[in-house]
Image (tube, grey):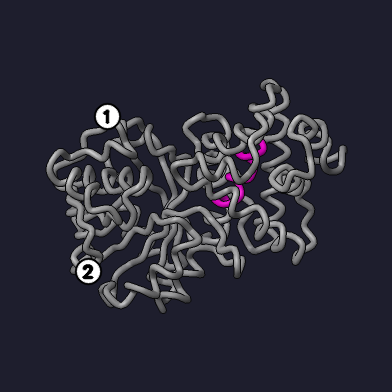
Amino acid sequence: MAKVAVIGAGSWGTTFAKVLADGGNDVTLWARREDIAEEINTRHRNADYLPGIKLPLNLVASSDIAEVLAGASQVYLSVPSQTLRANLVEWGSLIEPNAILVSLMKGVEQDTGLRMSEVIAQAAGVSVDKIAVISGPNLAMEIAKAEPTASVAASESKKTAELVAATATNEYFTTYINQDVIGTEFGGILKNLIAVAIGIVNGVGYGENTKASIMTRGLAEISRFAVAYGAQEGTMIGLAGLGDLIATCESPLSRNHKAGEMLGRGYSKREVLKQMSQTAEGLASVAPVLQLAAAKNVEMPIVEQVLAVLEGRMDPKDIAPHLTNSGKPQGE
């Protein structure tokens, strides 16, 4: 059993801290808000983000980042992707020298187009063999309720992936391993964009045929992109690709699905961001992903039309016919 730190006490950070604690680990969770840390320590709940969920006794919280990181052999990062670099620059020196850093985030840095593992390597000065990413069909509330699921821990170091997988496995949560960091990370990033598209057509009122068509076309689209950047094609039909895509597109618990649904009902991007209590990473990733796609000459018509809706250049009700007819008709 390991002493681990989880950074970020939102729904996913708290849920994953619970996963780790239920696996028998000594877990300390960093909460930006002192009142959340106090509630976790005294009532073993985080009512703002996981209402109705009882947290294990071996999960403690603190708003003191130095206290949280002290002695932690593994550090799990669950902060908004656009704040990661600044956070690591601020307190990266407090991380134990040989600690493994694990990204739970699914976003692309807007200014650089870098994946989160790349930001970690740059900002924290950590060797890639000490970095892992976790991704899969992981809706926070279902996991917090101990509903069975699985995920993937990916690292360029097989040993690191195995250590993380062993730490992040319990009776209801199984973590497998691979060494395809690019595919695992892009799977988590790109499915959010398709989930926004699904949310849009759901908000407009289109049915299951439309959504199934977009999901299928979307998988082909994001697979082309990921492979162009060095991912293994098989990763995209595994837990971190297809598995995550299905869960995120199908569930109203998905923040990206919810954001898309609001767009489909006529809300502007500004209004969606104002009303969302947590970050929908897909909205921030659309523009940088399209820039990366252009650099590799990868066509992403679904994502392009999501951007058109976000920017107010396309009426949401007009998106579905274009989405289902996007790309070459003879192929997937």
Asked if residue 192 is among those painted magenta in the image, a careful observer would answer: yes
Of 289 and 97, which appears nearest the observer? Answer: 289
Q: Left or right? Give the position of 173 relative to 178.
A: left
Q: Picture quarter containing residue 220?
A: top right
Q: Residues within 10 Å of mark 2 (few under 14, many from 20)?
A: some
Q: SS at mark 1?
A: loop
Asked if residue 148 is among those painted magenta in the image, a careful observer would answer: no
Predominant secondary structure, magenta span: helix
**Residue at the location (36% across, 43% down)?**
11
Point out which mark residue 52 bears. 1
Of 155 and 48, which appears nearest the observer? Answer: 48
Q: Amino acid at mark 1?
A: Gly
**Residue at the location (28% across, 48% down)?**
17
Range covered by the magenta-colored residues: 187-197
* x, y percent for residue 79: 40, 56
Of 84 and 315, which appears nearest the observer? Answer: 315
For marks 1 and 2, give the CA distance: 30 Å
* x, y percent for residue 202: 64, 27
* x, y percent for residue 126: 40, 76
Point out which mark residue 66 bears. 2
Residue 260 position (above or below residue 202): below
* x, y percent for residue 93: 30, 78
Q: Residues within 10 Å of mark 1 (few under 14, many from 20)?
A: few
Q: Are discs 1 and 2 less than 8 Å apart at CB?
A: no
**Quadrant placement of the C terminus:** top right
